[in-house]
Every structure is written in structure tokens, then in C-alpha cells.
Amino acid sequence: MFKICSKRRLNSNVTLIDVEAPAVAKKAKAGQFIILRTDEYGERVPFTIAGCDREAGTVQVIYQVVGKTTMQLDTLEEGDCLADFAGPLGKPTEIEGLNRVAVVGGGVGCAIAMPVAKALHDQGASVDIIAGFRSRDIVILEEEMRGMCDNYYLMTDDGTAGEHGFTTTKLQQLLEAGEKYDCVIAIGPVIMMKFIVATAKPFEVPTMVSLNPIMIDGTGMCGCCRVSINGEMKFACVDGPDFDGYSVDFDELIRRNSYYKEQEEHGKEHICNLTGGVRHA
């Protein structure tokens, strides 16, 4: 059993928990993930590791309530226990040798972008963070992310916080102004990552994305998390989750992620303003 040591609301629908898992905390690196079950009858659900305290033996997970399991997870409080907490899984984000990086996070993807930005900052890299949200009321982790970068750019679709525009808007501005990045690392909704890659491509900036296909076992056995990279089948759980953005078949990934949309939908669906038509639960 894995005890929830602390629980903190980041906004009305997103929560951070610290879970007692010393073995995971000892080996976890930025970009890796865990798979948990709330109880012995629960489904296996992957979450990216948002941070860890090796001395305390705790691992941070940030989740958004979007379906049955996250609803069950949200009923647990400090002192309650999870049945399973397996990890760390996946390959760590490759940051060695990067000196100037733009880290782009969209919505809850900022929870995944944060540990990557911190790891880069800790190794002495110059980091610009571009964080995008629909509006002020769902902004998360602003204070934490400001402390692990040289420049923090907050973008909102409606202009209620930071600058009015999308993450692509700011990246385009920075690149046109002559910023020279060793790499752009984009983490967020698939459609956002697709357009970040399209924005960076004319400037020939290497771009890495963290993919989020449907996943079950996290070991490559089930095959559910397969993605097409340069026309070859890869498994996000063991070959990723990070991949070269220029090599990803984003349209196929969007179709696969939408396969169980009807079963997964919870609450009001969101129409992504980047396209005006692609919907995300």
C-alpha cells in the first residue's frame, strides 16, 4: 500500500498529491511516469512524475478529474492508501548537452513540463518556459515554474492572465526575435504539440514532444500505446514517452486517443481554440 502524504488543490479540477513510494523516488528522473491503481479492483492509469523527494521517499503526481478513476482518486485524502504505484517507467527526458531550451507546457501538461524545466535549470541550462491556459482560473504552478527558468511567459486564450494568445504565438515571437534554442520541448494536448512542431520547423529548431497515447500495462506488452514515428511503430511506454516532434504522426495519434472519447467524457467538452473544431474532454 502507498500512503498519500499530502494533497493540494491547484485549481477546481486539478490536484497535486505526494505519495510515499521510496523505491520509486530513489530512481525517478524527469520525464518518467508511474502507473497506479486506487484499489485492487481499479484500472491501471499512468501519470507523469511531477517531482520527488528522495530523502522523504515521496513522489508527486498531479491529476485532473476527467473520468472514473480520477474521480475515485479524488475521493482519497491524506492518510489514505493506493493499492499500486509502479515505476519509474519510460525513458527519462534527454537533457544532457542542452544549454538554451524553450519548455512549452499546455494546461495540465505544465505538470509534466515542470520537472523537465527544473532538471534543465539544475544542470545550469538557460530555460524559457511558455505556459498556456484557456483562462486565469485554471492557471497552475506559476510560482513554482517562475523559480526554475530565466524567463516565464504566461499565455491565456482569453487574455485574462499574462499575455493574450497561444503558446505558439509566443514561441513564434521569440524565434522571430532571434532566440537561438538548442531544443524546444513541448508537453500538452496533442494538437498543441502538433502546432508547436509546425511553428519551430521553419526555424530548424530540434523539437521534442512527450506523447500521451492510451496506455495499460506500461511495459510494451499490451501494445495499446503504439505510435507511428517516421513510419515505424513504437511504444510510448518503453520507447518514449519523448520523441522527435518532426517524426510523429500526430493525426494518427489524435484519432487513436479519440477512440474511447464517448466513454471517457466527463462534464463539458472543450473546443480547442487552436483549431476551432478539435474537441478534448
Image (cartoon, rainbow, N blue to C red):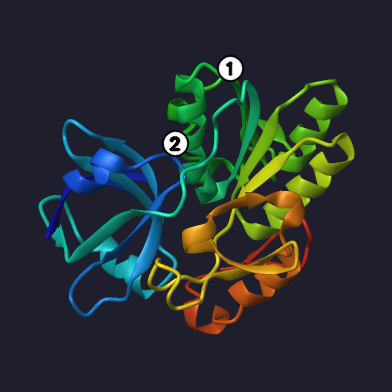
Q: Picture quarter containing residue 76?
A: bottom left
On screen, 172 above or below 9? above
Q: Residue at x 86, y 34 (%)?
A: 203
From the image, tell me which residue sits under label 2: 115
Within 10 Å of disc 2 (Cα), the crowding (few <14, some 14-19, many 20+) is: many
Q: Residue at x 69, y 38 (%)?
A: 159
Q: Residue at x 48, y 20 (%)?
A: 123
Task: Judge left or right: residue 181 versus residue 53.
Answer: right
Provide the secondary structure element on which disc 2 rests.
helix
From the image, tell me which residue sits under label 1: 150
On screen, 208 above or below 177? below
On screen, 239 above or below 138? below
Q: Quadrant of the N terminus?
A: bottom left
Residue 207 x/y as whole percent: 71, 42
- The amino acid type, in three-letter code, at marker 2 is Pro
Residue 110 x/y as whole percent: 52, 42
Residue 166 seen: no
Reading the chain from its start, which is encountered first: label 2 or label 1?
Answer: 2
- The amino acid type, in three-letter code, at marker 1 is Asp
Task: Judge left or right: residue 61 versus residue 153.
Answer: left
The dot on residue 200 is: none
Residue 28 x/y as whole percent: 33, 42
